[in-house]
Each structure stands twice: as structure tokens, then as C-alpha cells.
Image: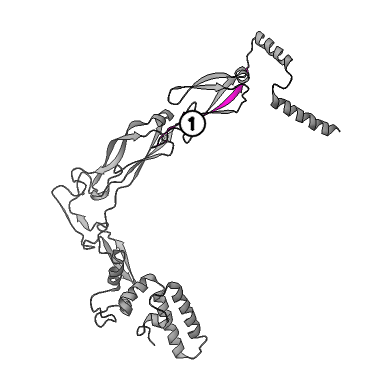
Amino acid sequence: MSATEVDYYELLEVERTADDKTIKSAYRRLAMRYHPDKNPGDGEAESRFKAISQAYDCLKDPQKRAAYDRYGHAAFQQGMGGGGGAGMGAEFGDIGDIFESIFGSAFGGGARQQARRGADLRYDMEVSLEEAFHGKQSEITIEVSQSCEPCGGSGAEPGTGKRTCNMCAGHGKVRAQQGFFVVERTCPTCHGRGEVIESPCRACRGEGRVDMPQTLEVEIPAGVDSGTRIRLSGKGEAGPYGAPPGDLYIFLHVKRHRVFEREGTTLLTQVPITFTTAALGGSIEIPGIDGAKIALDIPAGIQSGKQLRKRGAGMPVLQGRGRGDLVIEITVETPTKLSARQKELLRELQATETGDECPQSKGFFDRIKDVWSDLTE
């Protein structure tokens, strides 16, 4: 029995709409039945085993199956000059043409390679926290490949032209058949363009682009943060031979601030206060990131590490509305230089202390006493 005489689906006893799982299951069942080891000396079983193996080898491959479904066994016959199984005659000269008709130029080639766009570029810019808060207009100058003016990016000397590449006949690709498959490669002569420049432009040496400085205006929106990326479309490298340019990406880095730290739209800062202000309470003023003064009410008895929050005094929301918060962490500072009178007053205060004035200290030393008592019992 020849596999070319019997429909592959009939050989595997499945419908033409069968899925991969059904086809695989059918093949395993039939292969076990007709395997030569189970049928020693049975020539018909051996022939049947080879036929179903050939059928399964075709139908398990999506590309081969698609070709078979369309052209039958003729899809795999070399040089189908006449009387092809599908009655195709000389419509296709080789298997590469079959695959091209089914799957397009990915298999057959034929289409000229599209000119690739220019490369994208990166530019790193540093801004202050104040600039990130307000936003700014900035001007940058970069060295970048731009389209050659004399030749208009074509790469050909003005007044001259291009001719079709003889190597690939203008397709931009050359192909060679290797067994069942057709291998395509970019044409080494025209590099995929399908055309050859007869007289290269002297200004760009046939590249169609030249390196030159470019000055650009960049708008930094309010609220940017480190890692924010700004895209300038079409401001990257010019594409070769008149191809579209790439893009320019500006990566922003916000410099460290002397007063504020930043977490998203929240600003954080530490504010030291005197121990008398901490004990008695009071009010202080600090400058905000926008330059306005921020008044803070210090509650009496505040401790180091306590955080106060000022709503809407942080960074603006990028491309949105509103602002984050300002978080102020209080640090109670112990005086290091005291006058004689100040020391005298502190001693008077110390003499009147009962321990209830500082509940944290009292609680701590009470626990120490308990621990000491447990150790000495």
C-alpha cells in the first residue's frame, strides 16, 4: 500500500476536522496494531505501519497539514510538471512556491525588505526637586544622525539614481531550497533594499544620513520623579536610505535635596525642636517645597519620632490633579550649652519631679525593678 494513493485522514481513520490530540491518539492505536514487532513476517502490516507513520508525520505538523489540505499529496512532490495529484500542472515550479502561496512571503520571499527605521536614542537629564515640583522648559543639544540634505536621505548623488539589484532581481532576498524547506536570506549585495546606488552621495558616502548636533526643546511636566521617561517621537537616529527616524527617550533623575526626601508624591523631613517646646508645646514655621511658609502646631509633650502630617503640601501628581502630603518627623533636641541660670532652673525642676511627668521612663524603670526582684529572689 502506498501512502500517496490513500488519503492521510483515511489512513489514520479520523475526520479531516480532527484536532491534534485526536490524530495523535489514532496514530498510537494504529501503530501499536501494525507494528512489525507485533506482526513478524507480515509484509502487509509492515507496509501499513509505514503508511500511517508517513501520514502522521505530515498531519502533526501544522504547516505540512495546511499544504496537504490544500494540494493533497501533490504538495510534497518535486517537479510537478504534469499530472500532479491535485491537477496543478506546472502552476508551481517548486515547493517554495507552494508555501509562499499558503503562508505568504515569510516562506516564499518575493517582497522587498522594508527599510528599517532609525535607532532609538537615550538621553539622561538631571533636575532639582524644585524643578520637578514646578516643571520646566529645557533645551538640550545632542549629536545624532540626521537625514542627509544634499541627497534627501536617498544615499545617491544628486542627479543620479538607483538600479534594480542583479543578485536578487529587486526582491531584497535570495533563497535556496534545502530538502523540504526553502531558506531565505537577505541579499548580500543590496542588503535587502532591492536596489543598488550607482553613484553614492559624497556628503553621506551613500548612507543617506550624517551625524550632526541637534538642539531640542524639552518640556518637563510638574510632578516628574526619577525614572520618568519622556518620549520625543522622530527625534532619534535617522533611518538609513530615507527610512523613518527613531525616537529619543529622555530619562529623568531628580537630585537629592538638602531638606526633603521623597516617596512618590509624599515629602518627608526631620525638624528638631527644643525640649522646652516639646514639653510645653508651641508653634514653628518651616519652608515648603513651593517656597511658602508652613505653620506647625506642636502639641505639649510630643516625643522624638512623632510624625505630623500637612495635607496637600507634597509633590504634585504627575499629569493629574492635587498634591501629596508633607510628613514632618519631630526630633527633640537635648541642649548641650546651658548658662548657670538655666542649669539652676533645671535643677529646681529636677527636684520637683515625681516621675509621673515622664510615663515612658517611669514604666521602663518599674519593669527593671520587677526583673531585678525576680533575679534576687
Determine which quarter of the picture holds residue 372. Answer: top right
Name the residue located 50 percent from the left edge and 82 percent from the top edge: 32
Magenta segment includes 330: yes
Q: Quadrant of the N terminus?
A: bottom left
Magenta segment includes 346: no
Q: Is residue 89 above or below residue 321?
A: below
Q: Which residue is mark 1?
A: 325
Chief SS of the magenta region = loop
User: Which residue is nearer to you in this view: 5 or 46?
Assistant: 5
Q: Secondary structure at mark 1?
A: loop
Q: Position of residue 132 (x, y in %)?
A: 41, 32
- Read off the magenta span: 310-335
Q: Position of residue 59 (x, y in %)?
A: 40, 75
Query: Left or right: 278 with respect to 143?
Result: right
Query: Left or right: 360 with respect to 290?
Result: right
User: Which residue is nearer to you in this view: 43 or 151?
Assistant: 43
Outermost top residue: 341
Outermost left residue: 159
